[in-house]
Amino acid sequence: MLEDKNKQRTSLSELGEFGLITHLTENFKIYNKSTQKGIGDDCAVIAQTEKEILVTTDLLVEGVHFDLSYVPLKHLGYKAIMVNLSDVYAMNAEAEQVTVSIAVSNRFPLEAIEELYAGIQLACDTYNVDLIGGDTTSSTKGMLISVTALGAAKKEDIVYRSGAKPTDLIVVSGDVGGAYLGLQVLEREKEVFKVNPQNQPDLEAYTYLIERQLKPEARKDIPRLLKDLEVKPTAMIDISDGLSSEIMHICIQSGVGCNIYEEKLPLDPQVISTCEEFDIDSTMVALSGGEDYELLFTISINDFDKIKGNPNLTVIGHVTEKNQGMNLVTRANQQIKLQAQGWNSFSE
Amino acid sequence: MLEDKNKQRTSLSELGEFGLITHLTENFKIYNKSTQKGIGDDCAVIAQTEKEILVTTDLLVEGVHFDLSYVPLKHLGYKAIMVNLSDVYAMNAEAEQVTVSIAVSNRFPLEAIEELYAGIQLACDTYNVDLIGGDTTSSTKGMLISVTALGAAKKEDIVYRSGAKPTDLIVVSGDVGGAYLGLQVLEREKEVFKVNPQNQPDLEAYTYLIERQLKPEARKDIPRLLKDLEVKPTAMIDISDGLSSEIMHICIQSGVGCNIYEEKLPLDPQVISTCEEFDIDSTMVALSGGEDYELLFTISINDFDKIKGNPNLTVIGHVTEKNQGMNLVTRANQQIKLQAQGWNSFSE
């Protein structure tokens, strides 16, 4: 049989706003009994009688936060959910609901929006999160995604940024720096493609980095692991803007200082080899890279035995008195001041 | 003393994202004890032990939902909150929290964003709502505002769209059509201004209409009034997309029909006179205008005595069996089918 080479393109105006929302969301499942009412009324309704509710929101803008020349729409939808769930897990809570609003220009056919929602649905199904609302509208330029995530936790389980105490250990999940390097690789390939569109990139050496950038996973497992280990962090935050700036948030809000040890920073072998190839300092990448969506937390030193040797967790330093400052201790045993070089979307 | 004619313009990149959020939100107050933690952590935290939580979200896009050539930024901020609170009141609930995310291009100086937030703050202060989070980022073009509102109500007080029953009365708060005509007046003045920028418009005859368009008020008072009157609506919705399409939502979700009486539609005198001036049918404007942010609800006919004569409420029709259809009964006593001509942002 002959294949139809004309990919189907349905214009958004044919469906209209209500038709579009219904069409995009009809296959989503409800996983949480706290979701009393999802899409279809003026508001969604949530019932949490014994837990407090966590709320977080993030905005992703085409040309600022993502580049559709190398970010597949399905991955984008998935990532938009992850970015928000990560903030819920960073409170030591379970994520249960999301709302998703999108603005898209008429250059996007229905099939593109379906791809985006396929990623959103995959994320919801994988993380057992309910899509309970949203808004879908046109934009004059490009695509924008606004997600709000809701979660729940018992009052006594919630962990804020402000509880770190001197002598606490500073712990990070997974490894850091990969997502930033993945972006560098993708940006380089984009430039190569501009010069020679026939070039087939060999990305074999960067698969982990590219996955960290395009399809990050939020650490739903960490609050559960900590509960199993009977460890309640004293402070916690997710690493979206870079390890260094997140450590500083915890220190400032807790009124403490810290020492972070360069030699302890958890780096994937691909991070090390790619830093060498790009001739950039892996410590700088680990501290300032951002978008890793790992969790950073502090625990009482008395809990050290409980987490020791766990492959998901690395102790990278300890909390000090505030007057000691926030420092990186280098491999040469020099103390240098930590600097927040988190990302600023407004800088040119 | 000489006045400095150079209005101060501070670029957003000077402050950065964190500095900007802190600067914009530092004067907001917390009104509700359900707000355990507002801005400043990975998530906000809400505690509602005896009530269910309502969640709604809306996206406003420059060039699609608003035109900054005649919408002052302060009004825009106010309206962005109203649009969302209206959805919470439409569930017969109290609004308690909002998150506000904005994307703005670098053409906006800090002072413009401050104006926007002044309107958001005025809305929060007037309606006793807490700003608990948000995101602030740059855009490649224009301004976009994404608001999520949260509310609370006892389970037994929540009113959905789906409970209307035959013989119920259909009631609307306030009057309808004003916001749409306000937009027509503003659009006309914009065209006049393009031709003759020196022209000073005389908008005296349209003050109510323009206020309805630029500074709508959500009907916080209606759920309270209904409680005082001991009336629980059987179904309720807010009128954002036009009376006709909202009535149809209630009918379809409740599995009923309706008769709406043309002569009962509540119209402000400015609506009537401006419809004559623009030579458009006031009934069409009332049914399809949209953006009135009034509440439309159904009540048991047994409750009629409780609401009779209330200046805030007008009975405009009644619910029928589904097979009777959804009809407008004209002044000439003809039945014509209601049509949803709600606004579709995707149509060109």
Image (cartoon, coloured by chain):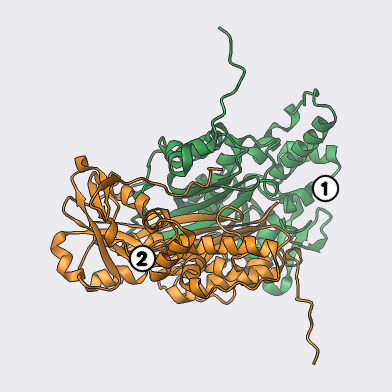
Chain colours: A green, B orange
Above or below, A324 against A71 in this view is below
What kind of residue is marked 1?
A: Asp
- Mark 1 packing: few (<14 Cα in 10 Å), some, or many (20+)? few
Q: Quadrant of the C terminus of chain B?
A: top right
Residue A342: numbered disc:
none
What kind of residue is marked 2?
A: Leu
Q: Nearer the viewer, residue A254 or B29?
A: B29
For marks 2 and 1, give the one nearer the viewer.
2
Q: Nearer the viewer, residue B321 or A111?
A: B321
Above or below, B209 against B300 in this view is below
Which residue is labeled 1 in the image?
Answer: A281
The chain to which mark 1 is attached is A
| Residue B103 appears anywhere in the view | yes
Residue at left 55%, top 72%?
B119
Q: Secondary structure at mark 2?
A: loop
Residue A329 position in % (x across, y down): 77, 59
Residue B267: numbered disc:
2
Q: Quadrant of the N terminus of chain B?
A: bottom right
Q: Quadrant of residue A259?
A: bottom right
Q: Quadrant of residue B173?
A: bottom left
Q: Secondary structure at mark 1?
A: loop
Above or below, A24 against B150 in this view is above
Horizontal arrangement in the rendering, residue A34 relative to residue B310 (left or right):
right
Horizontal arrangement in the rendering, residue B35 relative to residue B243 (left or right):
right
Residue B240 position in % (x across, y down): 42, 57
Residue B164 position in % (x across, y down): 22, 52
Residue at left 84%, top 40%?
A278
